[in-house]
Amino acid sequence: MFLFDNILIYIFIQEKHSFFFEVKLVFIYLSDNGKILAMTRKIKYLIILLLGANFSMNAQFGFSHEVGAFIGGVAFQSDFGVRHDFKTNAGNTGIGVGLVHYMNFAYRAECNCYMPETYFNDHFKVRSELSYNSTQLQHFGKRVDRSSITAAQLRGMKGEAKVTDIGMQLEFFPLSIREFTATDGAWAPFIALGAHYTFFQNGTYSELGGMGAISTTPVKYRDAWSTEGGSTWSVVSSVGTRYKLTELSDLFAEVRWQYYFSDWVDGLNPDPEVYTENKANDWNLWFHVGYIYYLD
């Protein structure tokens, strides 16, 4: 069990019999005062579909299973601040955590043997993931540093993006997965591409008063802010490497780019026809490290 931000996560792993495990994941969303909030039907169904609120993993399908977790930093690129600005990139950063599951097609745990070699099973793995990241947001850049009413309004604007992702990636390993699995101390670089379904909460506000007022909000954002949250798809692409720690465990490090198919993730969405500098959707860059265990 562990608590991250407002999400309480219980993990139960029970060995039923040889090569058969039952994994239970229980997610409880908490409000600031500790009361349990009801999850939406859509979140429930996606968790059950992809990771399973109570799913069984049986290594009788021509592959074996790996499970793991990761933690790292997130640089969020949004309508807060100025794109390609160092202060924005360094200031609008947060933290992310995740749980991962891999299908390893090169090895069968039930017989403690390798599958007949093909290019696919020796170079590809399928990864499913549940992750969460949270970033505090504010404006940076030369427009904020000026002495003007608009600059003061920009400095007073704050936000927070809380993002939960459920999705899958296909990972490609240029080097042999079989050789890596059999060699302690080996390295296995990889690249990956996939898609996630994203649930987001945003908390846009002004320290000067209510958002949307003439006295608190620049005209650019006056009708272009939200605290409603929502959901969208995103595409993810990553590059990283594994390190063989023991026969049944790896360490990994990864840099990942994630592009959302929405510009509301941060809670701001100025008219892109008028403010062309904000025409791109929100995106972020992750760097994280993690641990992977082979279910043998």
Image (spheres, helix red, strand yellow):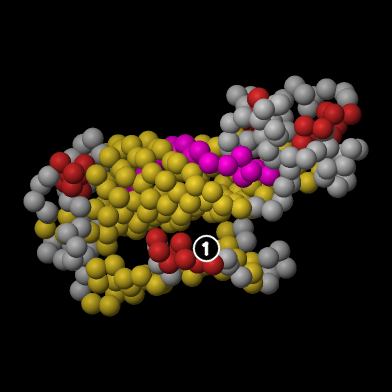
Q: In which quarter of the image is residue 123?
A: top left
Q: Which residue is drawn at 12% across and 54% down?
A: 114
Residue where numbered disc 1 is placed: 42
Q: Quadrant of residue 157?
A: top right
* Element assignment for label 1: helix
Does residue 288 appear left or right of residue 20 in this picture? right
Q: Which residue is drawn at 64% across and 47% down?
A: 161
Q: In which quarter of the image is residue 122?
A: top left
Question: Magenta span: helix, strand or loop, mainly?
Answer: strand
Q: Residue at x 27, y 62 (%)?
A: 295
Does residue 218 appear left or right of residue 215 in this picture? left
Q: Tag count in the figure?
A: 1
Give the residue furthest to the bottom.
Answer: 16
**Would residue 130 be visible to someone looking at this image?**
yes
- Type of amino acid under label 1: Lys
Specify the segment rendered in magenta: 250-267
Residue 262 highlighted magenta (yes or no): yes
Q: In this view, does 99 lie above or below 224?
A: below
Percent position (x, y) of residue 56? Answer: 31, 71
**Would residue 10 be visible to someone looking at this image?**
no
Percent position (x, y) of residue 104? Answer: 24, 53
Q: Nearer the viewer, residue 247 or 20?
A: 20
Residue 49 highlighted magenta (yes or no): no
Percent position (x, y) of residue 296? Answer: 23, 63
Crowding around mark 1 (Cα neighbors within 10 Å: few <14, some 14 to 19, many 20+) is few
